[in-house]
Amino acid sequence: MGIDPRVAGAQRYSVDLERPGMLHAAFVRSPHPHARVLAVDASGVPSDCVTLLPDDVQDLHLYGCQVRDEPVLTPLARHAGDIVAAVAAPTAEAAKAAARLLDVRYEELPAVFDPVQAVSPGTPLIHPDGALSAGEAVSIGVRPLAGTNVCHRFRLVHGDLTAGFGEADVVVQQAFRTPGAAHAPMEPHAAVAEWEDGRLTIWTGTQTPFNLRGDLAVAFGLEEERVRIIAIPMGGSFGAKTFVRHEAPLAALARKAGRPVKVVLDRTEEFVTLNRHPSVIRVRLGAKRDGTLVAKELDCWVDTGAYADCGPGVATKLGYAGVGPYRIPHVRVDALAIYTNLPPNGAFRGYGAMQSIWASERTMDVLAERLEMSPLELRRKNLLRDGDVFATGEVMHDVQFERCLQAAADAVDYERDPRGKGLCVLLKGMQTPSRAAISVERAGVGYVIRSAACEMGQGVRRSLQLMGAQMLGCEPGQIDVPEPDTDTSPFDTRTTSSRSTHMMGRALEVAVRDLRASGGERGYGEVHNEGGLDPDTGQGVASTHWHQGAAAAHVTVDEETGKLTIEHLHGVAYAGRVVNREGAELQNEGSMIMGLGTALFEAIEFADGQVTNANLSDYNLPAIGDLPKRFTHELIEREGAEVHGLGETVLPPVPAAIGNALFSLGLELHELPMSAERVLAAVDARDARAAAADSAPEARVPVAVDGQGLSG
Amino acid sequence: MKLALELNGRPTELECEPDEMLLEVLRREGLGSVRATCGIGVCGACTVLVDGEPLSGCLTLAPKVEGREVTTVEGLAGADPVQRAFIEAHGFQCGWCTPGFVLTAKALLAENPQPSEAEIAEAFGGNLCRCGSYVKIVDAVRRAAGEPAGAR
């Protein structure tokens, strides 16, 4: 075995793809956030270029993984950066130059950039025909609200909320905001599309080859078998490379050109391709005097941008994860996925969980203060335990929340001195329902394991080799794991929601048994996890196994400047059983570091719908120097437990743990990121409150959300 | 124009435009470890060593390296102790940024064989890893410096 190609510099990604006779593409993007395309004049484009214009896509269909609302080329730009035309040329530089020569005339339309405003009466509709049909990837019932910008409403009803608040001795209410964020994988989106005899092949970095195949088949009116996706290892993704992104206009351009066409997006284009959902979340939480939680209400405005993408799924997960890992007899959640004229927002490591956990776990500390109780004790008193019923009606099993929380608290010595320290404990689910299949073939001195589990740096190929070696009794190096190819890899729902090691590990056990039982050359295994939530009641099966974790932060603040120093950050993930030790550690560390960026400085800034920090200088990513003074984590295991996913678990709790650490110092932050400016404003607000309290003590006034919302 | 340099230990003559960036010229030579990423010299994924000093290929005009020694990770041939340390420490995930970290670490250790943690952080100020492999990258540098492995 040679050196790992990633360290040798020999790893190849989508940007490195070459096909004979290949042209290079550039996209023509709307400069306006909401505008009708009136005319496209391509007469200035050189004759050796191929243009893709609105007339060329008349026969194509709307596509979308959960709502079919996205055209291959749009006649109506719904965000700055929406693709209205495309050009192919012999070189990438020539394509970019030609794209600038395409003259597009627009009629600008009124636009909306805030999810709360977007559901106010009289707001322009971004998809006036409504959110119509669903794509193949949908595992949830999509509930658009006709005549509004709401493409999905998720509600959860458990118990009797009014009665619950009636029983409460103390009620706290608070609204929180999170901004859009960039996945910013180091590798930009890139792909090659090629047609042969009416059959489309795309080589691309994707986490979702089978969803991509299905959605492109819809867009091009083809049988799924007429589309082939070869999933190239990714230079990072974090949710950015899911469902259809750049591939649809690229495929249409290749069809027109009659030759393979490649595209590599610019860094600027990355910021208008897919981002994290901005959100506004209002929490109302009631408890008995002794700290027993009795009622919780969550209203969530989830900004899915110009197209739904998986916004309905994100709003759903955000909604139930916001209930938290607690026994609460009366719960109501109302989460709206809302269209705005921002670039589309989609899956982002944690899939909405961070946003609602930030809001909910911050509120727990507000409640603890009102009850004059330790935040640790308040949580411990209410945590779900084995056999308890969650708000979705699910009976909890393999519950480790208390162990995770205690481990986090102990790491920062919370019980001895909680000042400057904050905790967060979380529950999140795995994609349910879903299906995973895998095959094992004998090959020479070893085996070939085929699956559609996509490699993006998380080490899924290594995990399959390690699990396979153990089950087959060989060395990991004797197992070949080829890249996913929808023509040859068995079906898998997708490589998301920390599900691959759990689901593929189970499927692999079945496949190895099949190989042995048949005595043949090939074994096949397939597993399903059944379930799903009713979108109107939130009852059902949110997840067949739970991602459980916690974080603790210890901070100090320079009150003159607002500069925040993280003295110690500790993350805890329940692993069940660790398959790949170093890989699991890297997932924990990477999640926490991404969580630090979210907590402290990452935000996409917009002015009138235009991204104003679309580069890696103005949009900061965490560097080594941003690591906390102490940075630790642990993986909790249990004898005999199944493998639990952990690729995202310790990202969502980081912002709330830091926010609660600030709250212990009297600093109330309700909006991410917790920049020095915001910390300083919180210092001033605390001092102003103290001064006012000296003259006239009064109760704290909750911050209300602007606008009316729809959740009555 | 013609560009004469020592590329990965071999005297080499390349074609380039006077206003072309080194990144483009090296990729055209098939050196795929030099990766266009941020385009503005902040992420370090196109780092190359020029006379041993780490520079961003996206900000370095190709004609500026005339007559100089240019090293990419391909030139280390997998035999370098720093590369071995990255493998042992598992200091990478997707691998996109790894060549830049390896070369920056090489330059650091050549100048400062026993860097402190602060010096390591400073040296990597211009290298970003979105996967967040930093803890194990620091561990890799310590291993390459001959220190025993240890958690932060």
Image (cartoon, coloured by chain):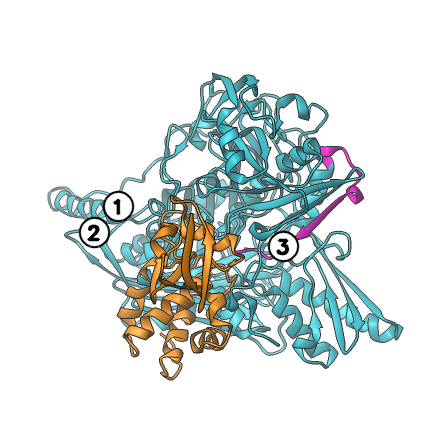
Q: Which chain is orange?
A: B
Image coords of residue B78 (percent x, y): 51, 73
Marks 1 and 3, how far apart at CA:
41 Å
Q: Amino acid at mark 3?
A: Ile
Question: Where are the magenta residues, as a range?
Answer: A218-235
Mark whose residue sits in front, 2 or 3: 3
Q: On the picture, is A359 further left or further right than A38?
A: left
Q: Chain of mark 3?
A: A
> A366 or A82: which is nearer to us?
A82
Query: Where A581 sits versus A312, above or below?
Result: below
Image coords of residue B139 (percent x, y): 40, 75
Residue A228: in magenta span: yes
Is disc 1 in the same subunit as disc 2?
yes
Is disc 2 in the same subunit as disc 3?
yes
Marks 1 and 2, how far apart at CA:
8 Å
Which residue was labeled with disc 1? A678
Q: On the picture, is A206 further left or further right than B32?
A: right
Q: Amino acid at mark 2?
A: Gly
First of labels 1, 3 by sequence position: 3
Image coords of residue A600 (percent x, y): 33, 52
Q: Residue at x 50, y 68 (%)?
A: A7
> A353 or A285: which is nearer to us?
A353
Query: Where B117 sits versus A613, above or below?
Result: below
Q: On the picture, is A461 further left or further right than B151?
A: right
> A283 or A48: which is nearer to us?
A48
Q: Chain of mark 2?
A: A
Image coords of residue A430 (percent x, y): 60, 56
Instruction: Determine which of the numbered discs, if any, sits on residue A392 in the image.
Output: none
Instruction: Determine whether the residue tagged by mark 1 lies in a helix, strand or loop.
Output: helix
